[in-house]
Amino acid sequence: MTSHQLTAAMFSTPGMQQIFSSHQTVQCMLDFEAALSRAQAQEGIIPAEAVAAIIACCDAGKFDIDALTTDAAQAGNLAIPLVRQLTAMVAKNNKESARYVHWGATSQDVIDTGMILQLREAIDLIVTDLAVLADICAGLAKQHVHTVMIGRTWMQHALPVTLGMKVAGWLDAIMRHQERLSQLQQRVLVLQFGGAAGTLASLGNQGLTVASAIAHDLELALPALPWHAQRDRMAEVASVLGMLTGTLGKIARDIALHSQTEVAELAEPAAAGRGGSSTMPHKRNPVGCAATLTAATRVPALVATMLSGMVQEQERALGGWQAEWDTLPEIACLCAAALRHMTYVISGLQVDKEQMRANIDITRGLVMAESVSLALAEHIGREAAHQLLERACTLAVEKRQTLLQVLSAHADVTRYLSRAALEQCLDPLAYTGEAASFVERVLAAHMQRKM
Amino acid sequence: MTSHQLTAAMFSTPGMQQIFSSHQTVQCMLDFEAALSRAQAQEGIIPAEAVAAIIACCDAGKFDIDALTTDAAQAGNLAIPLVRQLTAMVAKNNKESARYVHWGATSQDVIDTGMILQLREAIDLIVTDLAVLADICAGLAKQHVHTVMIGRTWMQHALPVTLGMKVAGWLDAIMRHQERLSQLQQRVLVLQFGGAAGTLASLGNQGLTVASAIAHDLELALPALPWHAQRDRMAEVASVLGMLTGTLGKIARDIALHSQTEVAELAEPAAAGRGGSSTMPHKRNPVGCAATLTAATRVPALVATMLSGMVQEQERALGGWQAEWDTLPEIACLCAAALRHMTYVISGLQVDKEQMRANIDITRGLVMAESVSLALAEHIGREAAHQLLERACTLAVEKRQTLLQVLSAHADVTRYLSRAALEQCLDPLAYTGEAASFVERVLAAHMQRKM
Amino acid sequence: MTSHQLTAAMFSTPGMQQIFSSHQTVQCMLDFEAALSRAQAQEGIIPAEAVAAIIACCDAGKFDIDALTTDAAQAGNLAIPLVRQLTAMVAKNNKESARYVHWGATSQDVIDTGMILQLREAIDLIVTDLAVLADICAGLAKQHVHTVMIGRTWMQHALPVTLGMKVAGWLDAIMRHQERLSQLQQRVLVLQFGGAAGTLASLGNQGLTVASAIAHDLELALPALPWHAQRDRMAEVASVLGMLTGTLGKIARDIALHSQTEVAELAEPAAAGRGGSSTMPHKRNPVGCAATLTAATRVPALVATMLSGMVQEQERALGGWQAEWDTLPEIACLCAAALRHMTYVISGLQVDKEQMRANIDITRGLVMAESVSLALAEHIGREAAHQLLERACTLAVEKRQTLLQVLSAHADVTRYLSRAALEQCLDPLAYTGEAASFVERVLAAHMQRKM
Amino acid sequence: MTSHQLTAAMFSTPGMQQIFSSHQTVQCMLDFEAALSRAQAQEGIIPAEAVAAIIACCDAGKFDIDALTTDAAQAGNLAIPLVRQLTAMVAKNNKESARYVHWGATSQDVIDTGMILQLREAIDLIVTDLAVLADICAGLAKQHVHTVMIGRTWMQHALPVTLGMKVAGWLDAIMRHQERLSQLQQRVLVLQFGGAAGTLASLGNQGLTVASAIAHDLELALPALPWHAQRDRMAEVASVLGMLTGTLGKIARDIALHSQTEVAELAEPAAAGRGGSSTMPHKRNPVGCAATLTAATRVPALVATMLSGMVQEQERALGGWQAEWDTLPEIACLCAAALRHMTYVISGLQVDKEQMRANIDITRGLVMAESVSLALAEHIGREAAHQLLERACTLAVEKRQTLLQVLSAHADVTRYLSRAALEQCLDPLAYTGEAASFVERVLAAHMQRKM
């Protein structure tokens, strides 16, 4: 085992580790074998007594995982040694029944369906967690609909925004991911069953009936035909989780930037042993953001692996398929971890409104120039107002004065705008445009989604 | 300019080159500027006379592209010099109107909306082309529903399949891409309009109304809020085109493998100057497959770029956004080229049924062993039948005889199976299982899609 | 733990699993801590008695790995809980000494130096294995210096080559990788030691002396300065292993293509339980090639992750660094596995010379047209010879005759070339140009390398 | 043409655009053809008069680029139509000579050698530019060897560092890239010449002699054998440029972070039209950093494409090779652009030492706690000193006092440390450890490199 174990708590979640554990991987494959035998008994293809014998052995706890691992390397896949162990186990109790194990199926049927069953759980888990994060964001956006802060573009102060609008932007993206996940579930959660070359030939004219019965048993949809070498479904899971991880990475980057010592507007929740530095007591490292940014650094390339792997040979592939086995679980784990981290961080996010307000003033009012210019334009025209403000800004920078100081001393301004009017123009909260409406629109969509 | 020009006919299409040409890129940006001014005049924000002056100049043909390029490098984006040129042009005719150019908008509003307008055309083009390819595949699948060929797994002969089923597999994947593209269009084709920090503050309380009017004018949906730093939409375009390219790459790999000199079952359409080799007259290089495989090699990484780029800073980003500019058009071009290549290749695909039939016999009937085994099992039981066939196969390999020869000489076989019955068992066409049903299911879905 | 365990025997090697095991990861970090305390005692910074107490605890076997994992997720890295456990362990025996644990070092010093120690072993292992593969290839190239086979370009028959030359091409690339690995070892195997911000400030004016002593102790080079946020060394390890994996993937693809049922020129070594198919006794799946192609599909993206991760913030990074932790070991494991697989496959490669010879004739001599044309040109001029051969080729295809048949019936040919001369021209072995010289050149370089 | 033209000034350089222009691409291919004919005339393979005729036409200016583009799409590569045009051109003047055009060579010989010639120029250009950047960094590191600033880890204030040390870290990485580039030039700049299947068969026993003569003519090394399907050389160019781009991205990220409005320690050089915002006069966007970060976002994936493409089929490949054509130039252009941008930015970097000094104080002295603790430890022991400082820090945060204020009021401190001693401890410049030595070491290595 690689050092993945050591980082699992950072870059995975207990739920995902359980779903993609060796035990569960084997169990999902066995679930297919059990469903296969039930379906075939139902159709009279294998004797009823064989089913009981087979199902009794379809318990991952009874399997020798180390032997599976070793033999898989020789066989080229996990299914061959799994079926061999299963057959031997059934034979011990019931020699006759053993020959009906895995009847008519091929290795990829077991492995793919097993993976689909794991992905179903994994996606469910992400869908559930994502709904929680969406609710938290909705609450935060609502709470801070009027919390003004400076907007930053190109990492420079721009104009005021609100924290509510920023969070609403996160939520809006999250809702699109919810929609994508829902559409994906329709398309992806299907049975794989085709036999050696995808024709189900060994089942004579009962192939489709059996396939349909297995799908029903496993509560999966029945695809139009087997898809051994058509991997767009797997690539879609990867892509959508990749996009979600990207959004989570964006949120993490935002929070990390806002948490910088100089900025200090947001902070990850404090907790004992969390992000501390033994030698530097003043530090609190944004460890949730770091882990999420790690996921966002790693997942895009893993998605590319899945897309590269789509170019598969003929009926069953050499390399492209096998590349999925570790890559898809890795994507799911990293995505789930990022989701968990951001949920933790956002749910306990420390918001320093005073610091937000103070930071706006770093440029001594320059970020409010546009607001004054627009007010003044009503009196002296746009062109003149714009030029006046440009000169005032330059002056403020040169003299290290506030824009208010400069403008208050300017007759062309005071003639039209009283001190109070000027202060109103320079109030960032009064210059957040549609920010509140945007929040409202997103929250309305969120409410509608939940109904 | 890089040598892209030289490879454009291979790795792009005329349609895509037009859509993403410098001229069209500028024009789509100008379309936004025009719509912006119309919307603002409609809302009384800018004078009606300004609109005419501005619209008259919104013609890419009038712009100095070289100057745009040079200035963009200084400004950091295309919009700044574009707006400067536009303003200067308007000012020449109407100094007053010039100040209303680009009113309330930010660079990213223009660039993103312009890109969305280009993507709309690009996706339309791909949707149209994909429908053509789907029809061609449907026709081919139908025509070859009974064309038997050997199925190959791990690049080794497995059991018989049909060409119809193989093509139906391509079509099935294509239809999922059609569905994804359709869902994507709903989600992605939206206006970008937020002003300097995304609040539309400079438009006072008319921001949303103006946004709505622009969206209506450009026939784009109005998003819940601006999405300057939320790039999942762009990533989704990349991902879905990436998946489609993967499927096309899979088809190309199939055809290339079937076109090998030893296999010779399929061939790209012959044409003068196509794939020939001056020094080797016997060669016909599968150039359509090569170009498609090139696209499938290049696109996954470009998708990863788009996903990596999602981690954007605050209200507007530094690097992640800019990385989209050349990457998205490149993905669209490569995908469209692959689509065009495969459409050309499949529509004129040369199918050698005799060679397909002959190739099945390379193993002298061994690939039909399962079929005989199943027939024999009815008489002597599965276990015995399986063991008998295994021995027969070994014998056939050792003696370099056909399986028919070996079995015909075996009393335990001839006792139950007549020569005719044996030949029937060894007939690959009689052992294609549900292949025809699978084709039917896919064709039915295709028909339903078209209605 | 993810299902990586199940695939470890396929996509890793026992050696790599040992090197990157949780135990060894922890041990290498402890090796740094031990060396640190030794160096500081030597310089009189910490008391001599503390060293013994600390070193006694620097044994991974004594650590609670599960607690490390859990705490690492809170702390954001492994070093913090590791140092905490180490300190507690030392304190149990010697409270005084405990305060000297990790003195002056930062988490990244421990983690990076630990990783460098692991990479040193990993690269050594690959260097050793690669030398073995180089020898095997040299032997094979020599053995088959005159084994003629058809060369294939664009997956079509071209002109004859030799198996020896093909293998020499593999060897030539391998030798370049050996050179790269050797240059990389010089550049990469260095100490990381800089303290909290990279200045070693807490060690006063003894920082460099201590650093030098640690480096000497661990047999690592001392870099010019700490490199916490300069990750080109790690990216280089990834890149060079990535290139090596690419070459191994190329070899695997070659062998897989030559192993196709229709081609049947090469085969992986046969072994019980290896690549078999229970339902299809005639099949032998190239599982070594499949695993290697899997590695070659996965590694490029992982290299991209390492390159993306280089963009690190300031003195120590948020995400980019952490992304290395699992990615580098994964690359090393996949590369080592591919190397092991290809070594196994090539060392037991089954070569069917007769089939190679037979495949050349599939085009009935057309691939030898150039050879005849050149011989004839001496008599009738190039232009005329070329045209004659073109017509002859066309005729051979139309009549389904061999080129020899067509040419033997052509007076313009027989006038100048006797039947024997013609047969000589059509002998592929006589038309392999410099193939043997190329093999010789590569073998000479290989011999020189070994001296 | 795609919109690459519009972004070329941002994401490429004039030099690279020239090197990879259509014209130069064609010219480098023609340079191979000319050298080929010279070498063959020298060896008596083609008539001397043919050489003059051929060389006279080897002028890219005479070629129809549009026709090349169109025909390349049919032929599958550029060389076929290029040779066709060249042959036709020669034939116009000298029909006899025309048949000696491209004698014995294959398309890939021309294309690969042409690319190598382009890469030689591209690498030269990067090597030259990199030396300039190294010098600039050396100057800056020297100049700021004592410019103290806060070190930041995990994007949080840590301990003081110096700007000199930070820049020395950049320079140190740059020097490793210089070394890599130099080693790469030895390995990569070789001739490609193998004929149709790599054996040079059509040249009889003169193949190697001709190859040697061409290599000599083009001033390229002669490889041990042709490398049509062994692409590690090309992958290495990509990887090394990828690593360099990563380092440049790291520098850009540093500068962008230091340029944030709140931090304001560094700024890109100001210039008319550079990074300005029409609506926000206070803004100066770091456009050089943005372009460099864009390159660093895009290049890793392009490197992955090159590595993925290494898995090439047999003697000449289908897709993997073709994927290099646009990808390598793109990497070179992006890398060169990033290099140019960072050179511009660093050479005119605005350094605000006062702001650096002021930012250190944001935590009111907390970042200096370790320094005081070490001084106090000499008097009261480490443990006690550490605990005292921890309490002092907590108090400073609670009371919003400086650490100096808190400590000055503490009898246990003032007993041992005078006000002056305390101030000395709290002086960040006095606590930069080996920073100056590190700078010195790097500068010494730089001087040595230049000799």
Image (cartoon, coloured by chain):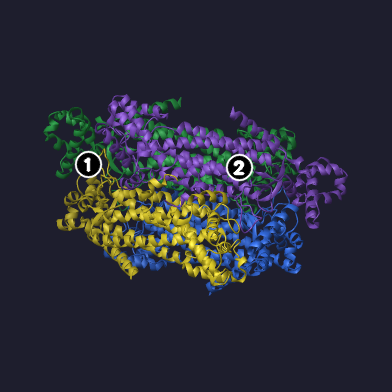
Chain colours: A purple, B green, C yellow, D blue
Q: Quadrant of residue A277?
A: bottom right
Given the current orientation, which residue lies at the most extreme front position? Answer: C93
Q: Which percent across, then down, holds residue C193?
A: 55, 64
Q: Nearer the viewer, residue D409 or D330?
A: D409
Q: Chain of mark 2?
A: B
Query: Left or right of D430: which side holds A220?
Result: left
Residue annotated with mark 2: B112
Horizontal side of A202 relative to D274 (left or right) equals left
Q: In the image, residue B367 lies at what x, y percent?
A: 24, 38
- The C terminus of chain A is located in which quarter? top right
Read off the residue under disc 1.
B362
For the question of whether residue C290 can be seen, the reply is yes
Between label 2 and label 1, give the one nearer the viewer: 1
Camera-nearest residue between B343 and B177: B177
Q: Are marks 2 and 1 on the same chain?
A: yes
| Amino acid type, callout 2 | Asp
- Residue at figure coordinates x 49%, y 70% from the top left: C216
Image coords of residue C407 (percent x, y): 19, 51
The local secondary structure at tag 2 comes to: helix
Q: Position of residue C425 (x, y in %)?
A: 21, 57
Q: Nearer the viewer, residue A155 or B79?
A: A155
- Tag 1, which chain? B
Q: CA distance from mark 2 to mark 1?
A: 57 Å
| Of the image marks 2 and 1, the number of the one nearer the N terminus | 2
Q: Residue furthest bottom?
A: D451
Q: Residues within 10 Å of mark 1 (few under 14, many from 20)?
A: some
The local crowd at label 2, few if under 14, some if 14 to 19, many if 20 or more residues have their Cα within 10 Å, is: many
- Confirm whether residue D199 shows in the render: no
Identify the element where label 1 is drawn: helix
